[in-house]
Image (cartoon, rainbow, N blue to C red):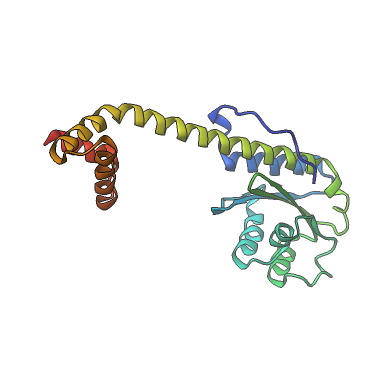
Amino acid sequence: MSLLPEPELEGPESALPGRRLSELAEQAVRCTAACCGAAATVADSAGEQPGAVTHPDLAGLLSVQLRSGEGPIPAARERGAPVDSGDLLRDERWPEYRAMALDSGVRASVTLPFHRSGLTVTLSLFSFRPGTLSGARHGPARALGDLATAGLVRDRRYRAALSEVDQLGEALRTRPVVDQACGIVMHVLGCGADEAFDVLRRVSQGSNRRVSEVAAGLVRT
């Protein structure tokens, strides 16, 4: 699987996994011959995230695989390589998925996995005709999957950066009251600054409150 250069951060308007996946699925259908629909998923160490499908009838094909752990998507994730079925009428793997696909009129499918920086994205393509998706694993859909995966990684890094900025801002805003509370503890207990802060931290952990909240309460009293 080819990897793209490390992405740059961009604005929050793109930091929506569902939007990324929807665009990936829709674009893949448009650029893949004989493709009648697509589904895209993303998972990380925290677990499964919502997927996207180009047609409501395909939602069942997605959910049955994620629920049962059987089907092209789990297989592609495990192998780290594309998994295809040229004709589901003759393919006896994954009985539950196969039955639902045939009931929806789907005869062929291929699932492409993309892994980058702890994220695993899958792109599944479907066709009403058997044997029509054999070249999809090397076609434009592969490049689209690489781009979408890089975008999702970029979005996650952007959100992490925003969270860090918020935490730093909170620390700067609450630093004066924490320092004041430490001064009170130092005066009462006759201890140093490190010991005073440790007292506030232990109270914070014991009361399930932030250190800044404990400090503010102490200063108010």
Residue nearest the viewer, comparing 209 with 31 = 209
Q: Please indicate whether residue 13 sits to the left or right of residue 167 in the image.
A: right
**As drawn, 154 above or below 84:** above
Residue nearest the viewer, comparing 17 with 116 = 116
Please give the name of the residue rendered at 88% of the width and 49% of the height, measured from the top-left corner: 135
Query: Quadrant of residue 142 in the image?
Result: top right
The x and y percentages for residue 164 are: 46, 34
The x and y percentages for residue 160 are: 51, 37
Please give the name of the residue rendered at 65% of the width and 44% of the height, measured from the top-left corner: 117
Please give the name of the residue rendered at 11% of the width and 36% of the height, measured from the top-left corner: 221
Residue nearest the viewer, comparing 105 with 217 = 217
Query: Quadrant of residue 194 in the image?
Result: top left
Q: Please indicate whether residue 134 sits to the left or right of residue 167 in the image.
A: right
The x and y percentages for residue 58 are: 66, 55
The x and y percentages for residue 97 are: 70, 66
- Spot the residue most to the left: 221
Q: Please indicate whether residue 163 sits to the left or right of residue 85 in the image.
A: left
Query: Quadrant of residue 153 in the image?
Result: top right
Q: Please indicate whether residue 87 sits to the left or right of residue 211 in the image.
A: right
Please give the name of the residue rendered at 63% of the width and 60% of the height, measured from the top-left corner: 60
Residue nearest the viewer, comparing 53 with 219 = 219
- Total marks placed: 0
